[in-house]
Image (spheres, rainbow, N blue to C red):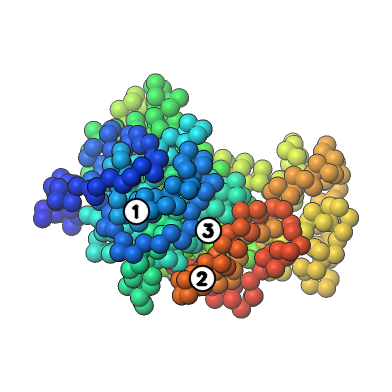
């Protein structure tokens, strides 16, 4: 086994090693997938053909019927034995070309030159009903050449967490990967204790990551880097294909998408938890829901990930880390930017684009704050300070982030009690702030009904609360009971419409639980 001087496996050796595993199980009966696999066809050398390990006694846990319809698939067929065989890794549908993608990544600031799909396989690509190309991938389907000593498996709890969080984010309007299916394998996964195994079928605009570019840039493989960049442009920014400085323009497009995405995260109180460069997509979708959570009381320093001991990926640090990750993408693209005519100015141009992230994020963040406060975009320069001052009130008094904004709607409609009930008995600073906000709102060109309707679209009442998530996952993993998971899934799929029967799902987790709450990456 030939190793590089840095201890990583050479890609050509990985490919040769894979030949004995490159075959696939016999095709399953027709579950309706119509694959068109551009990644396998256009990017040979950027992946290893591989096959899933299979499951001894698979059982369908959950099928996303709405997503299946979006993909042009028949949910009833997918729920049958042929669909289950595909989701369990026991058969490969006709036209699929399963492969493990190669990528690198900066993990907590340290560079790992070879990561790759250690427990995931890209089955292929389908075109959905709206003409969009979508990846279908298995997660937890067994070891690959990139597993680095891991078992390549996943457990029921982390699989259902990703399913739940992806659907919650989708319902909030945040770009995200989604789960098409979750399957119990009938096998156990060895972690601290044996856990029931599971496989997730993930759907994504693509699985291209910042780390994908880092992998080939670190190897100074200009030819593959060029092919990868051209592929990314054709897939996500086709209007740039003929641009003279298309790699610089690609960087600009990714900066814009990530600035918008992180502002959306912040607007809903979402903490990704592990913002490594291999977890940042070129498409601008949220990916890899491992140690993620939504903040309860507002705290920019909030960290729930068990592995983030230094707070690198704390809630309020996410914009800075996103910019840091984008700088790594810029470094990877530099040879291409230089070759496209920028020459000695390439570094300065790329730096300018990355530094522009701060302004782009701030613009999206201000738009988010205005929407949450029921204010129209205008030339008013005090809106940012108004939003910042309210956030500081929430921080000082440890007020629930979600309810703190949602109860402003009641206040706008003349009922101050729901908001005041969140605060201590008397908070003069809140009264002063409310006077400023109501005065600004009164001057807004939008009428009250229009403003409160907009606020309801920007301020959810239901999110995946810590205690609800953990209770649902525990019941599923320990007792095989999916009722609590499905009940919570139904709630978070309708996050904005307040319902009296669901009032308990809007309640924050107990303070004692939030104080010691930790999430795990699930590997």
The disc placed on residue 85 is 1
Looking at the rendered image, the disc whose residue lies closer to the viewer, 2 or 3, is 2
* Quarter of the figure that contains the C terminus: bottom left
Q: Pick whichever, 408 or 431, lies toward us.
A: 408
User: Where in the figure is residue 111, as x and y percent of width and height?
Assistant: 31, 55
The disc placed on residue 481 is 2
User: What crowding class fits label 3: few (fewer than 14 Cα within 10 Å), some (14-19), or many (20 or more)?
Assistant: many
How many badges with numbers are in the image?
A: 3
Q: Does residue 338 appear to the left or right of 498 in the view shown? A: left
Residue at 55% of width from left, 65% of height from top? 485
Q: Pick whichever, 195 or 311, lies toward us.
A: 195
User: Where in the figure is residue 11, as x and y percent of width and height?
Assistant: 19, 47
* Quarter of the figure that contains the N terminus: bottom left
Residue at 35% of width from left, 34% of height from top? 36
Of the residues under marks 2 and 3, which one precedes in the sequence? 3
Of the residues under marks 2 and 1, which one precedes in the sequence? 1
Residue at 70% of width from left, 47% of height from top? 457
Q: Which residue is mark 3?
A: 164
């Amino acid at each position: 086994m030939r190793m590089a001087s840095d201890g990583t496996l050479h890609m050509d050796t990985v490919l040769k090693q894979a030949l004995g595993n490159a075959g696939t199980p016999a095709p399953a009966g027709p579950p309706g997938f119509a694959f068109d696999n551009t990644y396998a066809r256009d990017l040979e050398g950027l992946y290893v053909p591989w096959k899933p390990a299979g499951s001894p006694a698979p059982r369908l846990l959950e099928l996303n019927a709405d997503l299946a319809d979006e993909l042009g698939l028949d949910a009833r067929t997918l729920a049958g034995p042929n669909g289950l065989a595909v989701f369990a890794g026991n058969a490969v549908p006709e036209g699929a070309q399963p492969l493990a993608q190669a990528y690198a990544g900066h993990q907590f600031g340290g560079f790992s030159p070879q990561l790759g799909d250690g427990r995931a396989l890209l089955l292929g690509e389908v075109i959905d009903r709206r003409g969009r190309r979508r990846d279908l991938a298995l997660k937890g389907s067994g070891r690959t050449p990139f597993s680095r000593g891991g078992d390549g498996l996943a457990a029921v709890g982390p699989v259902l967490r990703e399913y739940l969080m992806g659907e919650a984010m989708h319902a909030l309007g945040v770009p995200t990967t989604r789960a098409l299916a979750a399957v119990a394998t009938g096998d156990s996964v060895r972690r601290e204790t044996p856990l029931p195994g599971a496989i997730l079928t993930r759907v994504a605009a693509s699985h291209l990551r910042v780390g994908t570019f880092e992998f080939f840039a670190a190897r100074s493989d200009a030819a593959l880097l060029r092919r990868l960049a051209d592929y990314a442009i054709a897939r996500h920014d086709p209007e740039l294909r003929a641009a003279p400085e298309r790699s610089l323009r690609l960087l600009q497009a990714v900066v814009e998408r990530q600035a918008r995405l992180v502002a959306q995260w912040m607007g809903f109180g979402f903490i990704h938890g592990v913002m490594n460069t291999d977890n940042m997509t070129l498409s601008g979708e949220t990916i890899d829901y491992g140690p993620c959570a939504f903040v309860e009381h507002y705290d920019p320093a909030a960290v729930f990930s068990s592995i983030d001991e230094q707070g690198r990926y704390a809630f309020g640090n996410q914009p800075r880390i996103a910019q840091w990750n984008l700088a790594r993408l810029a470094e990877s693209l530099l040879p291409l930017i230089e070759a496209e005519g920028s020459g000695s100015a390439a570094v300065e141009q790329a730096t300018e684009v990355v530094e522009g992230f701060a302004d782009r994020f701030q613009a999206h963040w201000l738009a988010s704050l205005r929407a949450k406060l029921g204010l129209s975009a205008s030339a008013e320069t005090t809106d940012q300070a108004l939003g910042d001052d309210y956030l500081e009130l929430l921080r000082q008094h440890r007020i629930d982030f979600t309810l703190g904004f949602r109860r402003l709607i009641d206040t706008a409609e003349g009922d101050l009690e729901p908001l005041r009930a969140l605060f201590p008995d008397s908070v003069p600073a809140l009264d002063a702030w409310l006077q400023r906000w109501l005065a600004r709102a009164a001057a807004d060109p939008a009428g009250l009904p229009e403003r409160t309707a907009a606020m309801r679209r920007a301020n959810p009442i239901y999110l995946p609360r810590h205690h609800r998530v953990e209770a649902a996952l525990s019941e599923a993993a320990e007792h095989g009971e999916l009722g609590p998971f499905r009940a919570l899934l139904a709630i978070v799929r309708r996050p904005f419409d307040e319902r009296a029967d669901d009032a308990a799902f809007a309640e924050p987790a107990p303070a004692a639980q939030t104080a010691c709450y930790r999430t795990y990456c699930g590997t």
